[in-house]
Amino acid sequence: LTLSDGFVVPQGPSVSSASVLRRSSSRQTHLVLQASPTETTINDDSGNNSTDTTTKTAAADSSPAPVLNGKRVLPLKIMLAGLKGPHQVAAAYAIFDSNYKTSEWTACQHVGISRDLQETLQNHVEEHGPEQVAFVRALSFVIPNEGAMESIASDWRKEAIEKGGKTNFDPVLAAMERDFDDDDDDDDDDEYIDMDSLGDWRNFRRSLTMSSIDEEESVQEDDLSSTTKVSASSQSGDERKSKSSSSSSSRTNRNSQRGVKSVSKDNEEILRSQNKELADEYTTGVWAHEVSTPEVGGLVVRMPLEMELYRNYRHSLMGNRLKKLLDKKRMNTGMDALEISTWYARSKELIEEEMGRIANMADEEGQIDATQLREEASEMLSLYLDNQETWQEVCLVVQRNEDTGSSKTLVLNRPMAFQLTENLGKLVLFGAFQQQQQNKNFDSRTDLVQFMSAFKHECAVYVGGPDEQGNPAVMIHGIKDLPGAVEISPGSNIYKGGLDAAVKGVLDGKYSPLEFRFFVGCHSYKESALDVAVLLGKYQPVACARSVALKQCISLPKPLWHEVMELCGGDLEDLSSLELLKRDDLQFQVVDETLEYGAEDDDDVIEIVDLGELEIDDDEDDYFLM
């Protein structure tokens, strides 16, 4: 990954540890991560601002910190016994009284977050007694994040309030939390909608949103019309004609944004050559708009680092620093709000300045002792690396579990190959871990022959994400009546599975190979991590027409990320334009890594794919075989 000033950093863990930048013989600067002390300050329920230095002796580090999954409710004594040790466990937690044996949330007495759960629980026992503090439910966080922990605590408070439990030992604070939740729930009784009865409910919601905009614009145009009539008598003919033309142009522009919006005729032509039916659906009814939370069948779009800092001023040191700079600029200019081009430019400058400082810390040998990095610099480097690893991803949300907080997404715009070799066919069909076993199975070999016959010359395979890459590929399509297929969300008309029927349909000429997309790997999120990523400004959830999610990303003249952003309009469309201005500066290096799956010697290493070197074509969202 090449920074704008020319030094390179390979992907690695997030930098809460010490880092060393080492310059190689080619004068490129590389990042080496080592263990180091870090400090984290967080407000916990004990009322203290606790600063924790995580430097510990090697002996202390050898024992792992306890992990609490947030599902089990344990007696206080057992919880405290498990928390004993040198580690400080950060967690969201709920406390129940001795009546918990017969009920759960009705027995809740307090919900909160803590940087040191053991100390916080001991303080609660001393203040309120063992009858009130009898059982504990907790979800631990390896990397403390106040926003993420508070999000979990907020969900638990809602459950406690719904069941008649308490949310705070302080009765005043408990009453405030209950009143706030009641205000939100006043109209909930009338909000239930049967999604199945709406058909494509995303189109329904879009129509509802657009009709609301139409009403507002109708009022605005009526006001403008009245004003025009009053002043028309004092205007010349040319002036009236000019105003009329301007008004008509404005309405046309708004209508183009509101209705079917073409953002790339070239992309549409490519889609038509691949899938005529989907192309007709796209050109007559494509749409996309922002939503507040990720939803199955919708997208999450990776935001640029400039936007991430701008949004995440509450939980990021660099984001807070940017906010202060922008607040100062607003005061100096007397403006209520800054244009996106203004704050984007300032955010870009801040990133370049901070990364430049990090690069300039290199000594004569090109090394940097990252233990000397300021906390802001360490965070900046971590955010930069994370952003580069997921640069301009457009991900389809295929799974969400509200109870566990888990989610899975597939990256739509990371093509791997468009033709199958035998090894790649095995990877797609069986997965990396099952190849050796399946090679000995006659039925499996027959399946492989049929699969290769159907898809060998035309098969769209994508890197779906870094997780679960050893599993068989996930097949996504839009064929409703395909046997074995399952709709990923009611009303989405996006389907998963049905491989056997797909192979038979392609061989029989019923389907085209490009009606299907195969994804190796995924992004797998646990403990509401996707919601946290949205909260921190990393991803923007987007609802869209299914044609956006189902279309292939093969040699697109306009990359899918920019296409989706422009379809959404507003700030996202402006952000797309700003990002296009710096694309010439972006470069990528692909690191060649050897993957071994539990091999004990060279003979046991599984050769998965022989694709040669992959090169990213930055202008077409495409990978080419060299």
Image (cartoon, rainbow, N blue to C red):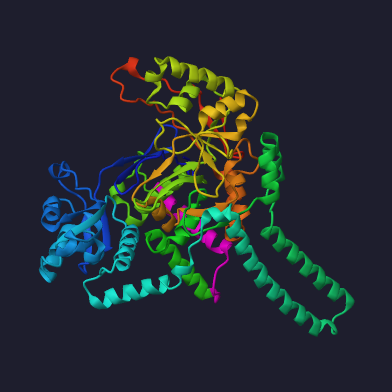
Q: Nearer the viewer, residue 123 or 125?
A: 125
**Residue 250: quadrant of the picture:** bottom right
Give the number of marks.
0
Q: Residue at x 60, y 27 (%)?
A: 505
Would you say residue 257 sits in the magenta stretch? no
The C terminus appears in which quarter of the rendering?
A: top right
> Would residue 343 be counted in the magenta stretch?
yes
Q: Residue furthest right?
A: 237
Q: Is residue 157 left or right of residue 619?
A: left
The secondary structure that dominates the magenta segment is helix
The foreground one among 384 and 369 is 384
Q: Which sits in the foreground, 351 or 605?
A: 605
Residue 560, how many percent across, how many down? 59, 44
Q: Relative to 425, is 362 on the left or the right?
A: left
Q: Is residue 336 above or below residue 593?
A: below
Picture coordinates of residue 341 (x, y %)? 58, 61
Question: Dividing the picture into quarters, in which one does residue 240 lie?
Answer: bottom right
Q: Is residue 272 visible?
A: yes
Identify the magenta region. 333-359
Q: Position of residue 80 (x, y in %)?
A: 12, 55
Residue closest to the eye, 529 or 157: 157
Q: Position of residue 336 (x, y in %)?
A: 54, 74
Q: Is residue 120 visible?
A: no
Residue 197, quarter of the rendered image: bottom right
